[in-house]
Image (spheres, helix red, strand yellow):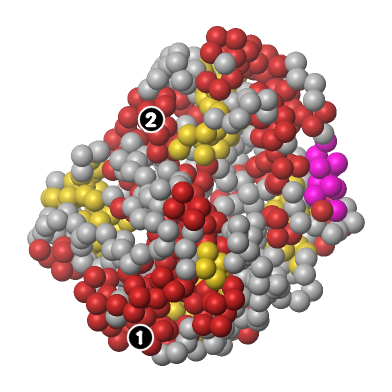
């Protein structure tokens, strides 16, 4: 039977793409989620994990949370009984009021991240939480806070990046510490192949994007800053540094140059594991003309991740790769580049006192103190799967005196520990807006189906909580359509309906140069290779050519990047995807496996002082010797022992912003 209606919407998952989706609604009531053939990114094809999930678990009432739930069993067992919305909201509000009266709103903490990247579902709840006065677990501390701070020191912003359409004018593209194949599949499938620019990938893992590159540099984890300085040495030696640009638009070059002068490729080769000839070849390609430099989220999840970012980001400055076609760097493109006002969405002015903020690395410690943590609200996140010190965290989440409200679409590891679970609507079930990390476009998330069961969008859940708490500020009750129309106008559009009619809009007719006026939002208005703000905060004034010490004999540096089949912890709820993800495995270089007398499929114990996991060995030359690879974010409740790879993560912090240094974890591996 032919489809009776096609509705175009946008996937809001936490990847760079913001893919277009077409929902075919059949006359018999059935629907199928497809790629949107007119969307400039996805071009008719969903990535495999999305196609399976959106036509599986996301449409299945048996797998979705469909009713408000109240705990009836011990925390962690996931035993609940359904209650009405009125009863749930009323009791939750009463518990929150009790905590405010007993210990203050700052003892209520909320934890969230980009379970959805849509603007309303991801931002509007902050209005309630700001009015409440709750403390916040810094979302970026689990992901990319070090990179943000490092770029702010040097360039004044971390959310302005190159326009991807500039690829047609670039001579080379460097992807450093990112894996588009897993985290931006349509950039891997289309973008890197639609330019004549030479592709250079710098990554310890030879993932499919690295395998497709003209040149893949495979440094040992933790040595990226040393490698960047060796790049810079070649640029200096070959006369590829724009000294006039640096003299006019940068601070600190004179002090940085002597350090660069000593960091030869021959010096860097044994430190990084990258042959000197490959360093020279890559640096020459990068220096030969305008270049795009994409710095991935995983790059800064290292003990010296902030310094790594400053060292790598300086390379664009040394070439003067700003204000011209085909040039610039990218960490991510934020909403402000599109004219969107994040403060309007989140309303921080509703907060009566300064926000109390803590790092995800300190969550276990925080939840260990009943005086400091009386309440917890988790939304758009699965901390029981994604956070460090997993075994200890699960124990703290079992505290009977900790009131825990969880909001989600599915019964995750985290919801199993909650006192109340409220069912969130999926992205197909309400209108919203999506601002992608990569392209300078804006997309409509168009409602395609009615909400499953009694689920509600995040924003409506928090409106109801605000009413039950007796709050009366009008911002807490502003309707979706009013907010979406305002955001559309901020972006230069007529209203949300005009965006919805088009699906995705390129907001700029022509590719936009990065920092076109060569003015940088730093205190000096220049690129601050030498940063007084960094020095005031206790960091070195300049980036430096650091490389982490190699693991001692018998130990391995453990990398736990995203799985090609998961989006952080999303999608594991679908049985078909769980089957493709498979059991927990750890991959070793063939020489390391041979040294341990291990073969593919062998059962091993992967351990350190934080935890111990039973895993299966895989063998491959996609990692250097001394490195172990185990993908993150399987749901612990679906695994033997109720633990995933984060059971091995001690929660060490990077050098900046109390951010995660998860890629600095070391383990031993032995036959089980």
Residue in view at x 64 percent, y 60 percent: 521
The answer to whether one can see residue 588 in this image is: yes
From the image, give the main secondary structure of the stretch colored magenta: helix
- Which residue in the structure is indicated by mark 1? 280
Q: How many labels does the image show?
A: 2
Residue in view at x 90 percent, y 56 percent: 494
- The quarter of the picture where residue 541 lies is bottom left
| Residue 439 image position (x, y, % from top left) | 66, 66
Magenta-span inclusion, residue 485: yes
Asked which secondary structure carries label 2, the reply is helix
Q: Is residue 567 left or right of residue 448?
A: left
Cα–Cα gap, marks 2 and 1: 45 Å
Residue in view at x 81 percent, y 42 percent: 483
Asked which secondary structure carries label 1, the reply is helix
Where does the magenta region start and end?
Answer: 479-489
Please say if 478 is above or below 114. above
């Amino acid at each position: 039977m032919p489809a009776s209606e096609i509705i175009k919407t946008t996937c809001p998952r936490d990847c760079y793409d913001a893919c277009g989706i077409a929902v075919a609604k059949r006359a018999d009531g059935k629907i199928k989620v497809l790629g949107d053939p007119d969307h400039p990114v996805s071009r008719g094809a969903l990535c495999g994990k999305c196609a399976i999930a959106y036509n599986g678990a996301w449409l299945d009432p048996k797998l979705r949370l469909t009713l408000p739930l109240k705990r009836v069993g011990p925390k962690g067992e996931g035993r609940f009984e359904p209650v009405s919305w009125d009863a749930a909201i009323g009791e939750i509000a009463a518990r929150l009021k009790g905590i405010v009266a007993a210990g203050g709103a700052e003892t209520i903490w909320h934890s969230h991240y980009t379970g959805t990247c849509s603007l309303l579902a991801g931002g509007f709840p902050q209005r309630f939480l700001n009015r409440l006065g709750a403390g916040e677990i810094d979302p970026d501390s689990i992901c990319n806070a070090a990179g943000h701070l490092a770029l702010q020191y040097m360039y004044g912003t971390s959310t302005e990046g190159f326009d991807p359409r500039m690829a047609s004018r670039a001579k080379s593209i460097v992807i450093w510490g990112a894996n588009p194949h897993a985290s931006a599949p349509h950039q891997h499938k289309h973008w890197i192949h639609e330019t004549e620019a030479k592709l250079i990938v710098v990554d310890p893992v030879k993932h499919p994007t690295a395998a497709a590159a003209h040149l893949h540099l495979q440094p040992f984890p933790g040595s990226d800053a040393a490698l960047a300085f060796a790049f810079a040495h070649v640029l200096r030696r070959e006369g590829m540094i724009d000294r006039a640009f640096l003299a006019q638009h940068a601070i600190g070059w004179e002090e940085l140059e002597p350090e660069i002068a000593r960091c030869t490729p021959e010096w860097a080769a044994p430190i990084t594991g990258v042959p000197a000839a490959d360093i020279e070849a890559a640096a020459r390609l990068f220096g030969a003309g305008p270049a795009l430099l994409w710095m991935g989220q995983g790059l800064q999840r290292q003990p010296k991740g902030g310094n790594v970012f400053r060292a790598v980001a300086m390379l664009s400055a040394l070439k003067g790769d700003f204000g011209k076609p085909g040039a610039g760097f990218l960490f991510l493109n934020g909403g402000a580049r599109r004219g969107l006002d994040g403060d309007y969405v989140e309303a921080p002015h509703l907060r009566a006192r300064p926000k109390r903020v803590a790092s995800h690395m300190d969550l276990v410690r925080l939840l260990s103190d009943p005086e400091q943590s009386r309440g917890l609200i988790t939304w758009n996140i699965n901390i029981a799967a994604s956070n460090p010190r997993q075994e200890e965290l699960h124990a703290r989440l079992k505290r009977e005196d900790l009131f825990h409200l969880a909001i989600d679409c599915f019964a995750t590891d985290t919801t199993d520990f909650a006192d109340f679970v409220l069912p969130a609507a999926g992205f197909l079930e309400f209108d919203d807006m999506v601002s992608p990390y990569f392209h300078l476009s804006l997309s409509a998330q168009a409602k395609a189906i009615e909400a499953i069961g009694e689920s509600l969008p995040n924003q409506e859940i928090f409106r109801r909580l605000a009413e039950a708490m007796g709050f009366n500020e009008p911002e807490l009750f502003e309707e979706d359509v009013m907010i979406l129309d305002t955001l559309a106008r901020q972006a230069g559009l007529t209203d949300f309906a005009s965006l919805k009619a088009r699906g995705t809009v390129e907001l700029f007719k022509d590719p936009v140069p990065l920092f076109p006026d060569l003015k940088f939002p730093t205190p000096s208005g220049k690129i601050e290779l030498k940063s007084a703000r960094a020095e005031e905060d206790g960091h070195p004034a300049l980036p430096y050519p650091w490389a982490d010490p190699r693991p001692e004999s018998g130990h391995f540096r453990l990398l736990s990047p995203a799985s090609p089949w998961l989006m952080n912890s999303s999608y594991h709820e679908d049985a078909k995807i769980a089957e493709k993800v498979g059991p927990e495995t750890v991959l070793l270089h063939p020489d390391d496996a041979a040294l341990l007398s291990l073969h593919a499929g062998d059962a091993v114990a992967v351990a350190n002082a934080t935890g111990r996991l039973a895993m299966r060995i895989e063998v491959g030359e996609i990692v250097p010797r001394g490195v172990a690879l185990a993908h993150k974010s399987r749901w612990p409740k679906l695994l033997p022992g109720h633990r995933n790879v984060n059971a091995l993560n001690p929660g060490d912090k990077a050098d900046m912003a109390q951010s995660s240094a998860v890629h600095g974890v070391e383990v031993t591996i032995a036959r089980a």
